[in-house]
Each structure stands twice: as structure tokens, then as C-alpha cells.
Image: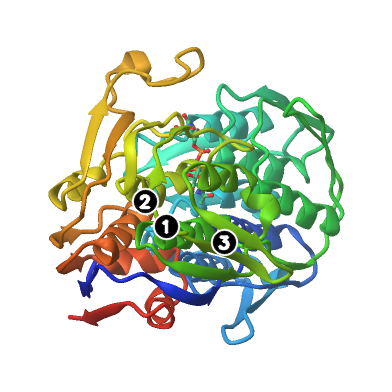
Amino acid sequence: MSGVLEIEGGRPLAGEITVRGAKNFVSKAMVAALLGESPSVLSNVPKIRDVEIVADLLRAHGVFVDHDQAAGTITMNPSGVGAAKSADIITHAGSSRIPILFCGPLLHRLGEAFIPDLGGCNIGGRPIDFHLEALRRFGAEVAKEPDGMRLRAPKRLQGMQMELEFPSVGATEQLLLTAVLAEGITELRGAAVEPEILDLVAVLQQMGAIITLETDRTYRIEGVESLRGYRHFALPDRIEAASWAGAALATGGDITVLGARQLDLTAYLNYFRKVGGRFDVTDHGIRFWHPGGELRSIVVETAVHPGFMTDWQQPFVVALTQATGLSIIHETVYEKRFGFTKALRRMGAQIQLYRECLGSERWCRFGRRNYEHSAVISGPTPLHGADIRVPDLRGGFSHLIAALAAEGRSSVSGIGLIDRGYEHFTDKLDSLGARYWRR
Ligand code: UD1
């Protein structure tokens, strides 16, 4: 990925920015539009690359997509849906993980689907075994081809029962997007309940689906004969909000994130407060600031919702380099999510990685599998500028924060990757008073 930012750090970021719809919801709601027999309209859509990728894939399948970027509205009309040319699909190979979610909707609409090889951040093996098992149980035939995966539905997909070994977000969405039009009842146990998934359930319900969520992570979906389009305002991006909150803490700053919603961030806010950050919830967003003085060290374990989200971890780690004492992070969602700490160490952070579970060993999948998935951060350590390369989306944003917090000049390359999930982030840096130059 191209793009280099030269950053002159060591200045508090202060000001107001706005977050719009959640990347991890908007892309899925766009896929859901394929299931309707009439147009759907999604608003609060951010201008990020993942949205463009899904729009291109929809267009390749004959869906009319009109993206009004200024208004943040996407209109999708699936009445002309048809098979895509393989070349139009393959061009998106490796760009995102969303294409796997096209399987169920395309099988329902066309009886077949071709899915490119997937991309997404390199933070672990990221298998799709749960997705494939689910699709096969619905009755789909799956065959691997050189450039992707070909699926066929010899007859209408059938409701089924499945229990996930781990509450995977993507697999839960796959099940929901497929079960809504499958014949009969589908029961999914051990499922994920992230706010973005519940917003997807809201969209599907508007479309005519019947989905019940029990208290024990079980979804029960009664398949219907057809669905219509929806109108929906996307929930805000709680990952982006937490990223800017981390930037406020790490730089000793004061950032108001307009559009951020407390309800989606309660676990994050608890830790933000425990470490010594302050926040104020208003009708329009949340103000996050560093009150001055010392930050406190803390122990955090990432988990599925309602726990501390894995995507909040990286910007938070940068702030923890400024906390007094030893902080511990036990990462239980992805096995390789500490790659970004190498650059932080070069900038002066003291971070030690461990293969052991420094937290609940009982349910962590990585402790006995030799992955460095626990981190101990010793602080406070002043950060100094360095030449760094963005490794993945969230890790990349944390590098940006580290460079903004560090004394001196840093060169951050590969920043194109950050556009995948952070809308207008350089404009936002401008309004927060950051000093940087594009090279
Ligand atoms: C989504 C989010 C990502 C977030 C993650 C966890 C999007 C576009 N991305 O990713 O930002 O970090 O949820 O909240 O919404 N797994 C399997 N087999 C599978 C599927 C998953 O073993 O078939 C494992 C993964 O390797 C990982 C864990 O389950 O260890 C969680 O993955 P999952 O929740 O599926 O993440 P994504 O949906 O890819």
C-alpha cells in the first residue's frame, strides 16, 4: 500500500471529529440488500475503501448502486441481479473478507456463487471453516477453484442447526444472511452478539425476516419466502471512536468524537476510566481527554461482545505505554495480534510478548498453541520518532497514534491501508491540530 506521512509528534491532539456508520456493519448491510426484491437505502455510510469494494461486487452482480458520498447514502436496487463475470470478482481477491458473506444471498437469488480468495488483515490464520460447514449444512455444494470458491445450491437451501465452537462474527452473519430465506427453521447456538450484528438483524427484520435472539447466544430464524428492501441509518463506528479516544489519551489530548454512542462502548469506557482517562457523554457524542498527571497501569483481556473488543486493543496499547507500572493484555480473539508492537518497541516502548495466557486460561484457544498472544507493557516510557510501516488496519492506526505521541519526526509508510476503515483520517488529523506532511 502506498502513501507516506511525515509526522511531527509530541503535541496533544485536541478538537472535534465525527464518526459515521460502522465499517463492520455497513459492508454487511450492503450484502443484505441482495436478498431484497425491492431497493434498499442505507444512510450514515462512511467513505472508506471496504464500502467501495462491496459496491463494486454488488455492481458486478447486476445490482444498481448509487453512492451519494456527500450525503453518506447508498441506494441499492437488486432487481437486475445476475451472475457476475469471474474476472470482475477475481480483481477483488485479497482485498477484504466481506465477499464470503455474498454466498448465502447469491445462492438464494441465483442458485450459485463465485467468491474470490479472501483478504483482510494478517492477524492470524483467519480460517473460514465455520462458514463452509454452515453453507454445506444448508445444502450448498462447495468446490475450490484456482482463483476462488464456486458454490451451488441444487435446490432451495434448508434450515439447519449448528453450534459455533467460537462466537465468530463473520460466521454468525453468514448464518443469518443465509437462514432468512432458507426453508424452515435454523437454530444457531454459541453465536456472536456484537452491536453490528444486532443492527444487521434489525435490517433483516425490516426486510421481512423472522429472527429471535435468546439470552444464551442462540439465534432462531424462521425462513420466509421472500424479502423486500430496507431503509436504515447505520450504527456509529465504535472501533473508530475508541481509536480516537486512544489518541487523546496517548497524546495527552482532548478529543470530542461526535456520533460516538455510549451503549456500544461501555466495556471500553470502563477501562478508559480505570486507566485514568476522562470522558463526558453528550447528546451528540463523547468527549475523551487526558486530565493531566499519571495514567494507571491495567489488566485487560480481549473478548467477544460484551467484552473488551480485540480491535480496541492496539490504540489502547499505545496509551498504556504512558501509564505508570505494568499493564497486561491477554488477546483471546486472534492468535497473532501483537505484530504492531515491534514498531512501538523501536519507538521506545517496553513491551514483552508471552506465549502463556496472562489471563483466563480456561477458555483461551491460544495458550497451548505457542502463539505470542499476551503482552506486558511497562511504562511510562517516552516515545521517540521512527520510520515505521503500517502492518494492518488497526495496528496501522496505532502506529499513527504512536507517531503523534512521540517526540520528534516519524515517517509512517503504507498509510493507504488505513483508508480501508478510517474515513477522511487526514482531514480529522487536521482538525485536531496534528502536524504532518504527505510524501
Ligand atoms: C470481524 C470484524 C473484525 C473483528 C472480529 C472480532 C468485520 C469485517 N471484521 O472479523 O474487525 O476483529 O470480527 O470481533 O466485521 N474463526 C474460525 N473459523 C471461522 C471463522 C472464524 O476459527 O470460520 C476464528 C478466527 O480465526 C478468529 C475468531 O474466530 O480467531 C474470530 O473471528 P471472527 O469473529 O469470525 O472475525 P471476522 O468476522 O473475520
Estimate how packed mark 3 is, as few (under 14), some (14 to 19) or many (20 or more) residues with alpha carbons within 10 Å: some
Task: Please name which of the two marks, 3 or 2, marks the residue nearer to the observer.
Answer: 2
Cα gap from disc 3 to disc 2, whole angstroms: 48 Å
Rendered location of residue 286, percent (x, y): 62, 64
Residue in view at x 41 percent, y 32 percent:
331
Q: Is residue 317 visible?
A: yes
- Answer with mark 1 or mark 2, whichever residue precedes in sequence: 1
What is the number of the mark on residue 83? 3
Give the residue at x 34% y 49%: 147
- Whole-Å distance between the Cαs marked 1 and 3? 49 Å
Q: Quadrant of residue 76?
A: bottom right
**Residue mark closest to the camera, 1 vs 3:** 1
| Disc 1 from disc 2: Cα separation | 6 Å
Give the residue number, with chain letter if any, for mark 2.
319
> Mark 2: which secondary structure?
helix
Going 71% across and 39% down the picture, which residue do you hit? 155
**First reached walking from the N terminus: tag 3 or tag 2:** 3
* Dot 3 and dot 2 residues touching (CB under 8 Å): no
Contact, mark 1 vs mark 2 (Cβ under 8 Å): yes
Question: How would you rate the neighbour count of disc 2 (Cα within 10 Å): few for under 14, some for 14-19, many for 20 or more?
Answer: many
Identify residue for label 1.
249
SS state under label 1: helix
Determine the secondary structure under disc 3.
loop
Query: Any atom of ligand 1 within 8 Å of the CB at mark 2?
Result: no
Q: What amino acid does circle 3 point to?
A: Ala
